[in-house]
Amino acid sequence: MTELILFFIFGSLAIVGGLTVVAAKNPVHSAMGLMLTLFSLAVFYVVQAAHFVAAVQIIVYAGAVMTLFIFVIMLIGVDKEENLTETIRFQRPLVAIVGLSVVVVGVFVSVGGRFTWVTGTAGAGPEVNGTVEAIGDELFTTWLLPFEATSLLLIIASVGALALAHYRPRRRERSEEEAP
Amino acid sequence: MTVTVDWYLILAAVLFVIGAAGLLTRRNAIVMFMSIELMLNAVNLTFVSVGRELQTLTGQFAVFFVLVVAAAEVVVGLAIIVSIFRARATASVDELSEMRG
């Protein structure tokens, strides 16, 4: 019963947040909508006994990633109007046709077809409990190599971001303009 | 009435479609990035729900690695957006057409 109530409250909040991301004119409002969705998903992770994932979701996504987004929005500025001219001919009718056919196929598959949501063999455990202990136990034995690979990826990403932020193209025109 | 795995999967599909629509319709690079994050999160919800249904922790490890890769992707992508903005003073992807064939 608790799960049902939580599902309806936070499911609708997640969808409202997602629609805000897509529809808001101001990118700051989009960021706030995304944060709402991220928090709602963290609630679902807690409900589904994925405690560690929920904590990481709050810390990494809502903490670090969204801060980065807000910083960049502030850096770039939010007052730019979006340019809505079509660059491809007949863009809008084509989009309407493709989108409508995707919706029709989706409804046909999920309602009309014989469709099972999850297939596969169930694991050994009676009930999954994603505590830090359980996650760490398996992460540092079975998943050790992927874990080390992600550390390499993070180092490469941070060095790449530093290089991109540090790089300044030499502008000869400007130095000539500035010369008296 | 209990919440089954189908409900979570439908919710995840709805969020994914919203994110995909945002990615396809918006021209602001930052908002497109946020739509990508929305899609990644929808997939994460799918992983956790199916992992719980199949009584395995593997889904949560998939989410863990998706989170790490998404964080790295955001760092590099936002650095690229900032450096493009410094060079061109725009964040609209329609105006970045030097590399068109």
Image (cartoon, coloured by chain):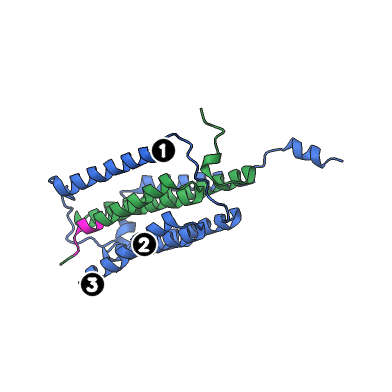
Chain colours: A blue, B green
Disc sitting over residue A16 in the figure: 2
Residue A98: % across, % down: 32, 39
Going by the numbered disc 2, the residue's amino acid type is Val
Residue B29: % across, % down: 50, 47
Q: Residues within 10 Å of mark 1 (few under 14, many from 20)?
A: few
| CA separation in Å, label 2 and label 1 | 28 Å
Q: Earlier in the sequence, mark 3 or mark 1?
A: 3
Q: Which residues are magenta?
A: B3-8
Residue at 41% across, 44% down: B24
Q: Earlier in the sequence, mark 3 or mark 2?
A: 3
Where is mark 1, residue-wise? A91
Disc 2 chain ID = A
Q: Earlier in the sequence, mark 2 or mark 1?
A: 2
Pair 3/2: label in front: 2
Residue B27: % across, % down: 49, 46
Going by the numbered disc 3, the residue's amino acid type is Thr
In the picture provided, is A64 more to the left or to the right than A111?
A: right
| CA separation in Å, label 3 and label 1 | 46 Å
Residue at the farthest left position: A114
| CA separation in Å, label 3 and label 2 | 21 Å
The residue lying toward the viewer, choosing from A84 and B19, is: A84
Whether the residues at callouts 3 and 2 have beta carbons within 8 Å, the answer is no
Disc 1 chain ID = A
Where is mark 3, residue-wise? A2
